[in-house]
Image (cartoon, rainbow, N blue to C red):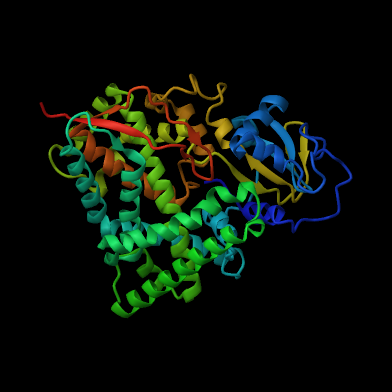
Amino acid sequence: MLDFAIFAVTFVVILVGAVLYLYPSSRRASGVPGLFPTDEKDGNLQDIVDRGSFHEFLVGLHEEFGPVASFWFGRQPVVSLGSVDQLRQHINPNHTTDSFETMLKSLLGYQAGAGGGASESVMRKKLYESAINNALKNSFPVVLKVAEELVGKWSSVPEGQHIPLCAHLLGLALKTVTQLALGERYKDDAEVISFRKNHEAIWSEIGKGYMVGSLEKSSSRKQHYESALSEMEAMLLAVAKDRKAQRKQTAFVDALLQSGLTERQIMEDCMVFTLAGCVITANLCIWALHFLSTSEDVQDKLCQEVEDLFGSDPVSLEKIPQLKYCQQVLNETVRTAKLTPVAARLQEVEGKVGQHVIPKETLVIYALGVVLQDGDTWSSPYRFDPDRFQEETARKSFCLLGFSGSQTCPELRFAYTVATVLLATLVRRLKLRPLKGQTPEVRSELVSTPKDETWVTVSSRIS
């Protein structure tokens, strides 16, 4: 995804009150149109909270002030960009670290790099991505097995029975990510359940809790979070120690153990992959199956592509790139659901967007959720239409936003692979239908998720 560098650190620091106390001379962000701070200390924080989510706040901001708008995080002015044209003009040369990795490590209180400068950051980024790719290659049968087990379970339910997507697909994500990241120890459901408990406690704070105030304001929340984080760190360190003694080379952690990283660095990378990998994978799969359930034509077209490529054979990793329509379905899922609705960069050197000058060290928000449903960029932006990605202009816009191409975060690439296996396995055996009258609302956090459980029904494709 686009570079979150410095964003998370700045944001969290502001929320806990450790902000710069010299108020800028201008109450606008370098003359960019936007909001005045409503509170001298917190800036527009209460406005964000009142809108219900950061994404909804940005939607209102850009509706009022246009594609380039400003607001305040505490005493720091921020510029937000809300159109493809404005994003295309914004240049930042810092691509040495992965955005999602940088963001999560900052929120967790970890150092984003190894402390060795740009060259070492590039090395760590390549190592992290390579470890994920190797884990997928070595343990692909695990992904296939978990997907087939879930589809088999759904095939056995009585026709018309409601299936809860959020619960089932979070389970699929947890089983695949933990086994690929940490090894076969997580074939044990008890281990997965223990992991899930701590995962949910940690993510509830870094995924949404940061937007409603500091942990310092609630001793019980802080204690719960710190306890879960401590338990998760201890578990990851123990897994790494155990895998090192066994000298295995199939899981994500094994590749890190071969790299010469410290135990702490290995633990931190495992934390980021397991946290982000589970959430992104689960929500991509949830939204993809929800949207598929609303369109029998899309299901039929996807089924035909899968059958043409694989026949009756199982899905293979090598052939996944040939599923072009499936890629379009997943791209449109990310766009329609606004899977990651916000990103940011620090303006490292003075820049210019349109007629607006952006000074050095200004925090620049990329309002991706706004752009992903901008009627000037996407025709019928609220309609689920995978065919739109047959057009080169749509693919280029999507790539510019960081959802495809070289800037895609490795966790999203991983999620695409898992989701492709699930969809290809499912559409050959089952037809999905939505629960009548159900329209899931989006909860826009760091990764968008349905506000409530989302339901479908299934029937056999084989008559």
- In the image, 374 versus 129, the foreground residue is 374
- In the image, 181 versus 361, the foreground residue is 181
| Residue found farthest to the front | 220
Horizontally, residue 374 falls left or right of residue 387, namely right
Horizontally, residue 46 falls left or right of residue 183, namely right
Horizontally, residue 398 falls left or right of residue 134, namely right
Residue at coordinates 45% horizontally, 76% vertically from top-left? 260
Task: Name the image quarter holding residue 91.
Answer: top right
Tally of marks: 0
| Residue 57 vertical position relative to residue 413 in the rendered view, above or below | above
| Residue found farthest to the top | 380
* Place of residue 405 in the rendered image (x, y in percent of width and height, measured from the top left): 46, 43
| Residue 338 vertical position relative to residue 169 in the rendered view, above or below | above
| Residue 59 vertical position relative to residue 228 in the rendered view, above or below | above
* Place of residue 182 in the rendered image (x, y in percent of width and height, measured from the top left): 34, 65
Residue at coordinates 60% horizontally, 70% vertically from top-left? 116
* Place of residue 336 in the rendered image (x, y in percent of width and height, measured from the top left): 46, 30
Residue 129 in sight = no
* Place of residue 223 in the rendered image (x, y in percent of width and height, measured from the top left): 56, 64
Horizontally, residue 140 falls left or right of residue 278, namely left
Residue 109 in sight = yes
| Residue found farthest to the bottom | 245
Residue at coordinates 36% horizontally, 41% vertically from top-left? 166
Task: Name the image quarter holding residue 254.
Answer: bottom left
| Residue found farthest to the left | 463
| Residue 297 vertical position relative to residue 365 in the rendered view, above or below | above
* Quadrant occupied by the C terminus: top left
